Image: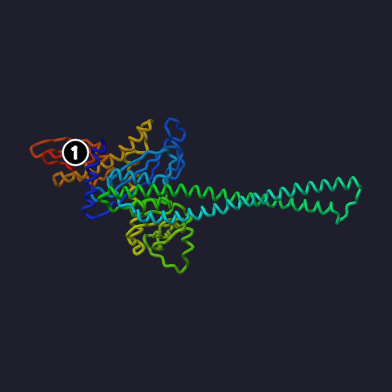
Amino acid sequence: MLDQVSQPAINTELQVLRVQGKRLRLDSDLTGIPVSNTSRTYPHAAFGHMDDEIRLGYQAGVVSLQSPTYGRLWLSVAHHPGDTVSCTQAEALVLAAEACTRLRPRRRTELLRQRLQAFEQQVAQTNERWETQQQAVQQAKERLVEAQQQVQEYQQQVAELEQAYQTRKLQERPTSRLVQARSRLQAAMKRTISRTSACKQAQRRLDKTTAQLSQQQSELARLSQRLLRFEQDNATNADPVEAEFRLDAGFGTYENVALLIEMGYDLYTKPHSHTVVTALKRRVNDTTPWTPVGANAELVAWPALQLMNCPYPLDVALERFYTGKTLKYSALFHFGSEPVTEHLPGWFEQYNGRQTIEAGIKESKQVFYLHHLKVRSEPAIALQETFVLFAANFIRWASHWLQAQAHPLENALNVQKLGVKRQVHVAAHVSARVIQDEEGKWLQFSEQSAFAGLVLSLAGDQPSPQQAKC
């Protein structure tokens, strides 16, 4: 039912973007919904990172669209246990956005095919190493058996000589056969110890390579399946769109970066691991020119930089900024057609534009009380999350419609200037009279209300916001 109400408005905004020749700009995040740490009545609640703390609760994966008309529209929300982490949810969030918009970019199958071919060579090299190490293990085992047999032979010789010496009451001399036999036995025992160690080392190397080969073969099968799926996606996508995703560092693993690139998206994110920052800091020195990009932030960047363990070259920037008197560093990743390294302030501004989803999450909690769960059933909790995001969208649709339909009177209430928070916390609770006459419908606010002296006037019978979209 909510989709029937929401989809026409979302489709209209998508059409506006396409008519204007703009790409889809999507933001995604994971936000915590904590409950009492001592509670035992919330099903599948788990401890996880929430608001810079370890709390018991849930995570909600959300996706928003930058809208030319409404600023921000929520597309989807997914309910998860509290121990869910961002890096595991990138693909699911992208697919949720595509399911809502019914649009997707062309998959970059040519890049994935090249990656697959390069990876096949790696697998072949690992397989060759595995075969060589398997032979080495076999040889080490044979040498160990040979040494063990020598020990047995020399032990028997020593035992026979000792018996003979005792029977004949012979005296042992430094060059006697018994002393020489004992010396050979001692050398054989040392050789056995050495070859046992060598055999174990060879087996450890083989076990490590076997595990690596198994992992690579699984990865090869996964990438092959992805290529087939993406080729089918392209075959059924007659009208691909240009789209970009902005994600925070929690999503910025190399695998997620590669996945979104292969799915056809331009990408703005930060690296998941701080080791990238450490490596980039080694690339700069006292003479490196830094570009100011904000009040206390500077960037230095490298276009198409090939990072270790990342399948594709990325535009990479090192950021330095002050928090109080402390100098801190961060990094930015970009992949796409935009030459971001040529205009660093624009890159910095574009990535930080994802604060719109952070503002949306803050609004969902402070205005619509997403973090105050009023139910205990997990399906009901998921439904509450859905209704909260629907309410945020619907108020934007309704206020835009009201402003468009209202008479431009001097004492007219400007609904859009109120902002969502004041509309919900104030306007929805003030007293007013509803008046209907031949000129239309009026809402006259009482003298005791926060909007005393103001009116909201609509001309005639106007269609609802959703009827107007149809």
In this view, the residue in front, 257 or 192, is: 192
In this view, the residue in front, 257 or 110, is: 110
- Measuring from the top left, give residue 201's x and y in whole percent: 62, 51
* Position of residue 256 in the picture relative to residue 439 (left or right): right
Circle 1 Cα neighbour tier, 10 Å, few/some/many (<14 / 14–19 / ≥20): many
Residue 101: image quadrant is top left
Q: How is the image coloured?
A: rainbow
Circle 1 is placed at which residue position?
445
Quadrant in which the C terminus appears: top left
- Measuring from the top left, give residue 305's x and y in whole percent: 42, 61
- Measuring from the top left, give residue 286's x and y in whole percent: 47, 68
Evaluate whether residue 296 shows in this view: no
Using the image, determine if residue 143 lies above or below residue 57. Answer: below
* Position of residue 350 in the picture relative to residue 126 (left or right): left
Using the image, determine if residue 329 lies above or below residue 388. Answer: below
* Position of residue 5 in the picture relative to residue 345 (left or right): left
* Position of residue 467 in the picture relative to residue 24 (left or right): left
Amino acid bearing label 1: Phe
Quadrant in which the N terminus appears: top left
Residue at 42%, 59% in the rendered image: 321
In this view, the residue in front, 30 or 3, is: 3
- Measuring from the top left, give residue 130's x and y in whole percent: 54, 52
In this view, the residue in front, 173 or 389, is: 173
